[in-house]
Structures are given as structure tokens and as C-alpha cells.
Amino acid sequence: MPVMTTSRTISTLAAIAAAITSSGIAVQSSPTHAASAPLVRHGRDAAQHQTAPAHRAATVTSSPRKLAETENYTYAWPVKPFRAQHPVRGFFGDPRIANDGESRQFHFGIDISAPNGTPVYATLSGRVWIHPLHDTTVEIVDGSGTEFSYWHVVPSVRGGEHVTAYETVIGHVEAPYGHVHFSEARYGHYLNPLRPGALGPYSDTTEASVFRFTSELDGRVVAPSAGSSFTLVAEPRDETPIAVPRPWYDLPVMPALVRWCLRDAHGHVVLGWRTVVDFRQTIPSASEFDRVWAPGTTQNHVRQPGRYRLYLTHPGELGWIHRGSYTVEIALSDTRGNGSLTRIPLVVAGRLSGS
């Protein structure tokens, strides 16, 4: 079966407004689009979530958009055409939550969209293994410490068999998944296949944005006050470089790098740049999940966009902060260096009575 691809013009950020209410600060991006029907981009749908008037504005600046060096890659795509970019509906590092929340981890690969039954090819010459716990997972090792794995694939090869890159069909996309989860590991450590010099050709000119920003206390959204143990939570989101076919269209993915700092009313740095997540090369262990992701984090489901709620701070970390006006700066970037810097006002009230 041929691989379905859908072209999309690149969206650009327009205005970003912040609504500062008793429920915190909602940062709303409003990119403009020229997408072909029936595709809808998440920036347009997101406007429905903006209900409070914007009486203070966040500001956003962007870095120049960059095209990847499309010829500078080590291996090609596992579905035909091998040397053409395919839609990726799940990024490296996206939250993955299963078994009613009992299993929580960082996405250790990428989800390449392809119709059920699509032939999946080896992208590495080596020996095949079938995962002992997942019989629709094919693994290929080449003896040099490199391992590629292909999940949601009905195997057409047997364990121990030797396969040749771009010649051997190792299986077909398993229904109803509509994608092949592809991962790369080196000596047991997962690597981001979309990093420069890995999977290609691949280019990305989209730009991530901060969808929502809140101050919270014990899971409740509160106005920040001096001396309290409030936390800061940001919800970033990025777009897929190529629009994904229905029914998984228009769902967000995670930017690869999230950093932030805090400035006072005079623009002086009072809390230097801190890295929240960096998925450009690898991912944290699953044990770090609850330290990185705040409660309420969800992954994408069909027609249900995920919420990527990142802790900027944890309880007590801003206990030293004084009453006054501040600016939170949040910098986002993808694996190709496309970035944005969002500046959000933060007003800290005096100590609560009795505190």
C-alpha cells in the first residue's frame, strides 16, 4: 500500500495574548494557516479555549526558521519512498501514559504515520530479533552497539534472520495503529531519530509556542503570593512539519528543548536560565516522569489533543520571592533550532494573611 502524505504550508505565529485572571495566565497563540481541507491545525482550534479577555499581553520573539540539510543524514525512512519525508505524529519525549496511569514514561521513539498494511523495511543491515514480550515488535542489531526497533509491525521475518537495509520487508503496519513506532538505541540508550545527522531527509520549519501558563498550589490554580509554595507550570506545544492524515490530524507534539528564566521589573535576571527538558539527543529515565510532568498531563488521543504540563518550578523553590512584578521568559526550540521566546508578566502579591 502506498504511504499517505499530505503537504501543508508552514504556519506562522501572529499575536499571543495572556489572560491574567484568578485562574492564572492563559497564553494563547493565534497562528495563521493555509492548510488544505480536511486538515485543521491546532492553533486555530485552540482559540476556543480563550474565554477570558486579554488585559495584559505576553510578547513573543522568534529565531529565523531553518531548513535541515536534507542530504546530511545517516539512514532513511522505513517506509517507501525511503528518501522522502513522511508525517510524524508522535515526537521523541512526548508523554506516554497507559494502564490507567500506572505506566508513565517518555516516548522513546517517533511515530511515523502510515496506513495499516504498509510494508515496513529494514533501515539497518543486521540480525533480527522479535521482542520476547511484544510479538509485533521487530528489532535489528548490527553488532556495533546500534539497535533499531519497529513497533506495531506484523513480522514477515523470523528471529535470527539476517536482513538488508531497504531491501528486506520486515513486516507490515499492524491494524489499527496506522503508524510504525521507530526507535534508535546505542548501547542501550535511546536516541532521538530526528536529531541532525540521523533519520532523513527531514526538515522542520514550524515553531513551538506556549499554550498556557499557570501558577498553582497543591494542584489548584492560584494567584502567586510571597512566601507561599506555589509552582509555575507551562504548557508548550509544537506542530508537526507535515500534516498528519485523519484521524490523527491536528494534534500537538513536544518541542525538543524548553528553558526559562525570571527577571524583575527592571529586567535584571533574578533566576538564571534553567533547562526544563532537553530531548534533542536523549530522554530521561521513566523514574523522572513525575518530576518533569505536572498532574493533568495527557498524551494525544484521536481528536483529543494532549496536554504537556511541564513543571518550571516545584513547591518551595520560589519561597524567597518578594512582592512585585516579574517577567517569566520561556524559550522553546526544536531539533532544527527553530525557536521562540515568550515573555509573560508575573505579579506576586504580598504574603497571605496568617502565613
Image (tube, rainbow, N blue to C red):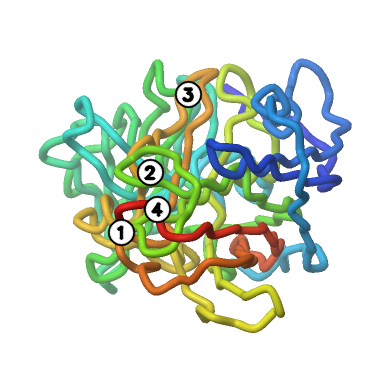
Residue 182 locus on image (x, y percent): 41, 46
Query: How far is disc 3 from disc 1 in space, using C-alphas?
Result: 41 Å
Residue type beneath disc 2: Pro
Query: How far is disc 3 from disc 2 in space, using C-alphas?
Result: 19 Å
Circle 3 — which element?
A: loop
- Dot 2, how many residues are within 10 Å of its Cα: few (below 14), some (14-19), or many (20+)? many
The answer to whether the residues at label 4 and label 2 have Cβ atoms under 8 Å apart is no
Please identify the residue farthest to the left as the structure is shown: 132
Q: Quadrant of residue 7?
A: top right
Q: Which residue is mark 4?
A: 352
- Comes first in the chain, label 3 or label 2: 2
The answer to whether the residues at label 3 and label 2 have Cβ atoms under 8 Å apart is no
Q: Which residue is mark 1?
A: 315
Residue 226 locus on image (x, y percent): 43, 63
Query: How far is disc 4 from disc 2 in space, using C-alphas?
Result: 35 Å
Residue at position x 60%, y 82% in the image: 269
Which tag is nearer the camera, tag 3 or tag 1?
1
Circle 4 — which element?
A: loop
Query: How far is disc 1 from disc 2 in space, using C-alphas?
Result: 22 Å
The answer to whether the residues at label 4 and label 3 have Cβ atoms under 8 Å apart is no
